[in-house]
Image: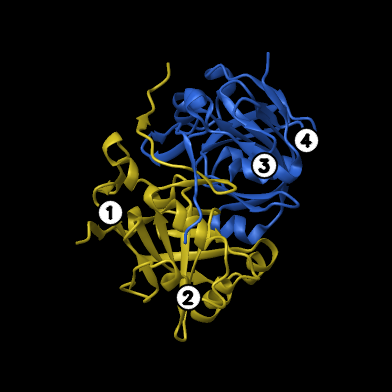
Chain colours: A blue, B yellow
């Protein structure tokens, strides 16, 4: 049973507004891959567009160049070990989904692998080809064409991070396998 | 008394590795400004380079274009009200530093405003002019030329997020003035 529901495209950028660590998923020609990426951000709400840094030497970048698409999946606190694991080895010679028993479905629009078990949300992304920024900064721009999130932690277009759903919340990589996990969110108050 | 100490440039990108909300500071021709930005990321460790999304219509973008530089300051949990406040109004007609009693010094290399009180770290950044990405994605690339952090929460090149320094940790904007604040970090374990 899944707790995932579609997220309106106008709310999709909000899924990564707070800088979570993400998994980048790819598939092309019978091969598929998943890697961890700490460096991503939205660049626009409407249309929903994002940027993500993917080293040009990676297998993931090869599959993105070939397919023109990728998935962004947001691992939650229960998945920090898996996240670190898929960020530590290349998928050029092994299928990391099999290796780490990661369950993936096909995204509804582009067919990229999307992960729900152990994740709080996913976004299907179509690459916007920008050869210069990909070469100079390893930075890939993309448009989000579909998104979904776990309704226990994201609903009505907003994250709801509470004490009772800490394990379902997204994570943030500090470096060296050290992750910031769940926290109860606080609302800013107006200043005088 | 300050708890800040210089951060080696090779560790500077790690300061924003985990996707914190930042304050972008600017100064040019006797004017200065500070705004909040949720969307930033490193793009390279060495040389330390970052990307940040700054709407081309903002006063901040005008000052960056004029000066070729900006500061990135990382507000901590005690500063969420100030962060939301400086993200909600324009500095075109008022000095937000005065308005919100924000204490700023001049960065050592470029002279951009750097904020230590209420912040966990700062980075002085020199814009790398990229007219196309600035126009198409509001995305500014920059090289970090100096950085410093509060040694109570960042030392020996690493963030140290613990139960005893929650208020000094960086923050993450979920949207609508709702922020994820401090959390004790967890270390990933190797998977079988």
Marks 2, 3 in one chain? no
Q: Which of marks 2 and 4 is in front?
A: 2
Q: Nearer the viewer, mark 2 or mark 3?
A: 2
**Pointer 1 indicates a residue of which chain?**
B
Marks 1, 3 in one chain? no
Can you identify the residue that label 4 sits on?
Answer: A110
Vertical position of residue A132 compared to residue A70: above or below:
below
Q: How crowded is mark 2: few (under 14 residues within 10 Å), some or many (20 or more)?
A: some
Query: Residue at the spot x=75%, y=39% of the render?
Result: A8
Residue B128 position, x and y percent, is 52, 70
Can you identify the residue that label 3 sits on?
Answer: A64
Can you identify the residue that label 2 sits on?
Answer: B95
In the rendered image, the quadrant that contains the N terminus of chain B is bottom left
Vertical position of residue B144 compared to residue A105: above or below:
below
Nearer to us in this view, A53 or A148: A148
Q: How far apart are marks 2 and 3 (CA)?
A: 45 Å
Q: Distance between the residues labelled 1 and 4?
A: 45 Å
């Amino acid at each position: 049973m899944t707790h995932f529901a579609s997220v309106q495209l106008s709310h999709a950028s909000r899924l990564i507004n707070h800088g979570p660590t993400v998994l980048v998923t790819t598939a092309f020609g019978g091969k598929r891959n998943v890697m961890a990426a700490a460096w991503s951000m939205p660049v626009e709400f409407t249309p929903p567009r994002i940027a993500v840094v993917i080293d040009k030497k990676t297998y993931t970048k090869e599959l993105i160049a070939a397919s023109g698409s990728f998935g962004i999946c947001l691992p939650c606190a229960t998945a920090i070990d898996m996240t670190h694991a898929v960020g530590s080895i290349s998928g050029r010679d092994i299928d990391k989904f099999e290796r780490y028993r990661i369950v993936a479905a096909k995204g509804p629009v582009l067919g990229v692998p999307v992960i729900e078990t152990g994740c709080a949300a996913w976004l299907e992304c179509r690459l916007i080809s920008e050869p210069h920024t990909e070469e100079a900064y390893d930075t890939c721009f993309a448009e989000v064409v579909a998104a979904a999130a776990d309704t226990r932690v994201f609903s009505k277009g907003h994250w709801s991070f509470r004490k009772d759903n800490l394990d379902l919340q997204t994570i943030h990589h500090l470096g060296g396998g050290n992750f910031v996990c769940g926290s109860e969110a606080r609302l800013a108050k107006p200043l005088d």
